Image (spheres, grey):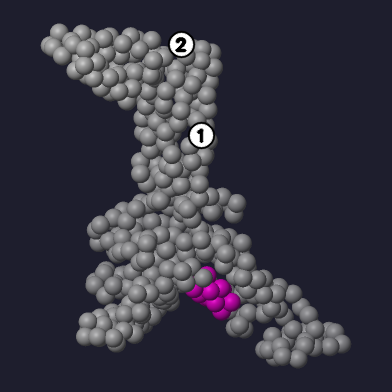
Amino acid sequence: MVLTGRTALLALLGAVVVALAAPSATGVVVVTAVVLALAGLDAALAGPVRSLRLSRTGDRAVRLGETARVVLQVSNDRRRVRGVVRDAWPPSAGATDDRAALDVGPGERQLVELSLRPTRRGDRPADLVTVRSIGPLGLAGRQGSHSVPWTLRVLPPFRSRRHLPSRMARLRELDGRSAVRVRSAGTEFDSLREYVVGDDTRSIDWRATARGGGVVVRTWRPERDRHVLIVLDTGRTSAGRVGDAPRLDAAMDAALLLAALATRAGDRVDLLAFDRRPRATVERSSPTEVLPRLVDAMARLEPELLETDFRGLAVEVLRRAGRHSLVVLLTGLDAGPVEEGLLPVLGRLTHRHTVLVAAVADPRVAQMAAGRGDTEAVYGAAAAERDRRGRHRVSRLLERHGAHVVDAPPEELAPAVADAYLSLKAAGQL
């Protein structure tokens, strides 16, 4: 049984009556008995909550930063239930108002709509639904909880989608002109056309020129059906926060833009999330399935607070990428993990594949490096400059071992990785 504020007011009124009319122990007992009797009667007359039938409909998935709609349906087969229903969710689900008035009669049903604006990725399961039924006097009622399972999957936001049209324009430009280099393993013959001023003379097809009446050149287009393996490092360094989000979230955004671009370029895209074991994999997806499967796989990923096993990662990459592939490793540029873990195995990867290492840089480091206001700012600038030099040294080491390196702030990482992919494609290095 639950009591309401009316019960407290009734008890207060009874106390006033006792004080004025019957200031004795008997008066207290009588008034207390009346209040309890009325409250008990009201609770008995309240509609039963255990017999209610509850179900849910609505959104099963939503992108981070967007609003989901979940509807709770309450059906009643017995006495009218008047009161309040509370639909409990974890705080990160972002429920705006989880309480609603309830008034459902026999044979009726009521829909209670709840808006959710999650603040974190992953699966957000609903908690118990609690119904409080109040009696006709408003003094007391019944309360019970129901388990109504529902899980809302919060997907990565894919904020870098706005960069896709401009990169697609560059891709169409690549398809429409000859590649930067002369014919190599990374270009395919496209067609013959007449020579125009500015064409590379090495592209002239002398046999076709001899057969015809004018100079003819060959045009090439970037190869299609290349294999792009995106590797997300979910180890300790991916948990570091840059701004309001961990580095892993910026890496996911870059992976989604690259996957969308590479798929439209005719390449096959796979995903591997790894720290000491595979955390998520996406393989052999059709072009229409790539992005939905990547988004679904990434939604549940969280950084693991342990060092990445780069030897195990290299074994997984070599096992999954049998032929020459573009391996895009989204990781950190911290000197320790790179020099002790990645560099010893990098040669095995670059010997067979083209490797692009992409890392999230902290824009606050650049701001600190420019500080000169006081002694504290100068020391901060020195520390920031040391960090920048360290990242630059690590980048040079990776490049000496045959890798391509992208180091950019979170909002610039995705387009920078997409540009690096387009440059490699144009140069015939995929």
Q: Nearer the viewer, residue 323 or 289?
A: 289
Instruction: Assess whether residue 417 is covered by the magenta stretch.
Output: yes
Q: Secondary structure at mark 2?
A: loop
How packed mark 1 is, by other alpha carbons closer than 10 Å (few <14, some 14-19, many 20 or more), is some
Q: Nearer the viewer, residue 300 or 205?
A: 300
Q: Find residue 92 and report its horizontal and vertical position in percent.
A: 37, 46
The span picked out in magenta is: 416-429
Residue 15 appears in the figure: yes
- Residue beneath the point at 21% across and 85% down: 375
Q: Find residue 302 and report its horizontal and vertical position in percent.
A: 34, 53
Residue 142 appears in the figure: no
- Please give the label number shown on residue 79: 2
Q: Amino acid at mark 1?
A: Glu
Q: Is residue 290 left or right of residue 192?
A: left
Dominant secondary-structure state across the stretch colored magenta: helix
Real-space CA distance between mark 1 and mark 2, rounded to the nearest whole angstrom: 23 Å
Residue furthest out toward the right: 213
Q: Secondary structure at mark 1?
A: strand
Occupied quadrant, residue 319: bottom left
Q: Is residue 329 left or right of residue 204?
A: left
Q: Nearer the viewer, mark 1 or mark 2?
A: 2
Q: Is residue 407 left or right of residue 306?
A: right
Which residue carries the number 1 mark?
113
Quadrant holding the N terminus? top left
Q: Is residue 264 left or right of residue 11?
A: right
